[in-house]
Amino acid sequence: MLNETQIDELRTAVGPDRIITGRSQLQTYECDGLTNFRVLPEAVVLPRNAEEVQAVVRFCAKHRVPFVSRGAGTGLSGGALPAAGGIVISLARMNRILAVDIPNRLVVVEPGVINAQVTQRVSPYGYFYAPDPSSQSVCTIGGNVAENSGGAHCLKYGFTVTHVLALDVVLPSGEMVQLGSPTLDAPGYDLAGVFVGSEGTLGVATKVTLRIVKRPEAVQTLLAAFHSIEAAGQTVSDIIGAGMLPSALEIMDALSIKAAEAAVHAHYPECNGLLLVELDGPSREVDALMIDVQELCKVNGAWEIRVAQSEQERALVWKGRKAAFAAMGRISPNYIVQDGVIPRTALPKLLSEISEMAGIAGLRVANVFHAGDGNLHPLVLYDRAIPGEEEKALDLSYRILQLCVENGGSITGEHGVGKEKQEALGRMFSEPDLATMQLVRCAFDPESLSNPDKIFPRPRLCAEKPGPYVPHPLETAGIAELF
Amino acid sequence: MHSPFPLAKEEIAEHLSAVAGPDFVHFDGVRVTVDPGNAEDVAAILRFANANGLTVTPMGGGTKSAWGNSVAADIVLSLVRLNRLREHAWQDLTCAVEAGCTWSDLQLALTSHRQMVAIDPAWPDRATIGGIVATNDSGALRLKYGSLRDLIIGMTIVLADGTIAKSGGKVVKNVAGYDLHKLMIGGFGTLGVITEVNFRLHPTEERRRSWTVRAIDPMMFHEGLAALLDSQSVPSSIQIRTNGQRFALDACVAALPETIRDFGDQLQQVFRNLEIADSSEEVWLEREELFNRSENLILKISVLSSQICSSISQVMKSAAEAEMEIAIVAQATGLIMIRLSSSPESGISFVDHLREQVEGAGGSVVALQVPEMLRERLDMWGALPCSIGLMREIKHRFDPKLILNPGRFVGSI
């Protein structure tokens, strides 16, 4: 609990109009996109520049107050969930694009800049910022850096980490450092590489140098309707097997199509497996490869194939796909979004197992996924009003993740571990793996102040040694339990 | 705690024989080399070394053992027996390979499904996966496909205390846990020993064509190169090279025949006043050729890509003034390799002067190969990064007794 003097100290750090302490206003910050975890922070500060962030973090280091940095709060794993007794550093006011360097294909931004604004800013020069999470019209670059966000087009273009060259970071001690460099191979460890995707646990980024990409000469988007999701999945394998690298390969099942249609009328064909293929590159190459893709769709039994004929049609196709999560609200009172990844070849087997598990649990599961990279987004639909159904849904969604791990995959492809999947991380990595990751955490943040108690499965302190499992001192003392 | 009485080399060899087997331990009177056969043996060797305060240098093909500061370790831990391709999930476009496998052996195996790991490091026949990763080597393909950081999806490492840890996984898209492997790429074996690496793969470039544009001054490439990089073409590689007299710009594209023709037309257009001809694949080996003279100084300079031509121009001028022989291979990504033959004094002042200019503009100058007589006097790494304190802290956490390649890296880490 912060006392009045401490609040005053924070107020001095950021200015009187950029600190929130009133309960009703604090409630805006009590969760992110994962709404079933809520913690009311002690205070929220809204710094305007790196020096103010540094002053706030120094305050936290001095008083050992935990802090959580936050962008737009669109994360789906509870990464921006406040720490009990801690403060939230909202980067929303640090939203300036600081530099655009077209000859070197670089853009320098503050962390509160919205993802889509980067593309808007550079599109007059024929460039775009490639990572495109579904929330790109509202989510911030700072949040993308924390989560190493992907999106539908990362199959070809890579993730946020592929596009981050350098970062200014306020370390949990309050020290300001630059990680990485706009020039390649800066001497030293790739700290920028390890910072991206660390979910806000290693410090606060205050400036980010991004790489932008030339917009391809041609983009073509195809929709193909199949009688089964397996046939759509086989087509994906055949496209990859033919040596093509589409910019996106997405699959939606009948339930997701129904939801997307209800929400945005994307005019999708009604089918059991809808495949969306996007090719981009030099015009002649795209034209030639699109013919090959259509052939492969036909060979696998596609009964309707459409190629978007205009930019508007293409935008509509994507609108439906990107709206799929939110659209679930149209067909189910509640739902859980999962984010497991599997090797692409395990897709048919896994989908039938998920369907069987859903049948046994008496729940519906809608499937929307980035088929090219095996990133599943099973949406477990349920009704909270029915006693016991939420527990059943949670159990099913965790068992789906377990299935992903058993099939050589990952518990998260782009949403992050956050609060939601802390325990699941322990199913994916062994104790020595986690202890080694913790060495990095402790080098950056020995006091565990920056977004504490996230990602890792149990309370850990920096004095712990890697090796076989030993009970944590807090456990032994009866202060914490290992679940 | 290690023994207050240091072990004799013979004793070290004996202990290691018990772990790896006597056939796999060699003692030449100066250093002990051990060739473990699996990650568990690597762990046992490191545990032994750590307990006894013995320093260790991990080694693959040894092609880049001169890179970084000199280390005379007690034990050379050779990875050559860990040389298997563990998995090639060709339909998933991924593979898992042990660190001692040579680059050529890996690529050859992947070719059976017309796939590759999309970088072109130096000395592929001898260089191993582990060494390439530890030194973050890359070639001209980096323009199109990125570097190892973009291609490695998982890794197994053994820490100084013998802990075997994995990070990442076998799927391309994965944000679970910290990406420890990012720290190992370019970490020069100072944080752990890499035993296995998982890569994402790309289809091989089956239809490639290269051209060479010639000029008498590097600045004559400047506008054309900027136009190419700002265009919608997707070349695989572009490099500028010189042996000190004339300058060549090589460009390669891999695509369908129509697109290849279009790219050729574009080259004619952007370099319309220059001589352009088809060239062979050989030109892409020029970077490696620079290293053929071990008595020369080799520098790796990193600048923004818009500064390549002017940097080459500047370097040429300085070399001429100092009467040095010079050869350069610069990639369009902004990485410039230069080879210099010079007297020790002029070599040092040349590097100092270059660092002043390049580091001042946000770039870096690292000495990769240094003639023996300069080794003690030339700082290999240049200015310390502002995050050096954090880097030292990471080293301290991973390797508290400083047994892994001590002193080899930036800031004597």
Image (tube, coloured by chain):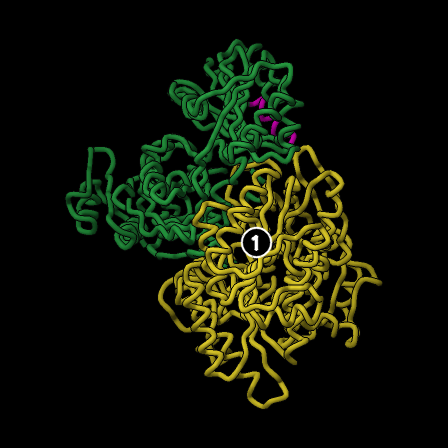
Chain colours: A yellow, B green
Residue at horizontal 73 percent and vertical 43 percent from the top: A123
Q: Nearer the viewer, residue B180 or A271?
A: A271
**Which quadrant holds residue B68?**
top left
Residue A436 position in % (x across, y down): 43, 58
- The mark total stands at 1
- Which residue is rendered at x = 75% and y = 63% of the image? A45
Query: For the point 34% across and 48% down, which residue is it?
Result: B97
Please state if A335 lies on the left or on the right of B99 as rendered: right
Instruction: Judge the density around disc 1: few (<14), some (14-19), many (≥20) Cα neighbours within 10 Å.
Output: many
Image coordinates of residue A248 in percent, x first then y, are: 57, 53
Q: Amino acid at mark 1?
A: Val
The reply to whether residue A440 is visible in this rendering is no
Identify the chain of the residue marked 1, using the numbered disc in the image: A
Is A25 or B171 nearer to us in this picture? Answer: B171
Q: Image quadrant for the N terminus of chain A?
A: bottom right
Is the residue A185 above or below the residue B277 in the image? Answer: below
Residue in front for this viewpoint, B12 or B247: B247
Which secondary structure class fits the magenta region best? helix
Q: Which residues are magenta?
A: B352-361
Q: On the image, numbered disc 1 is attached to which residue? A: A277
Place of residue A96 in the rendered image (x, y in percent of width and height, measured from the top left): 77, 49
Q: Is residue B380 visible?
A: yes
In the rendered image, residue A73 lying in the magenta stretch gets the answer no
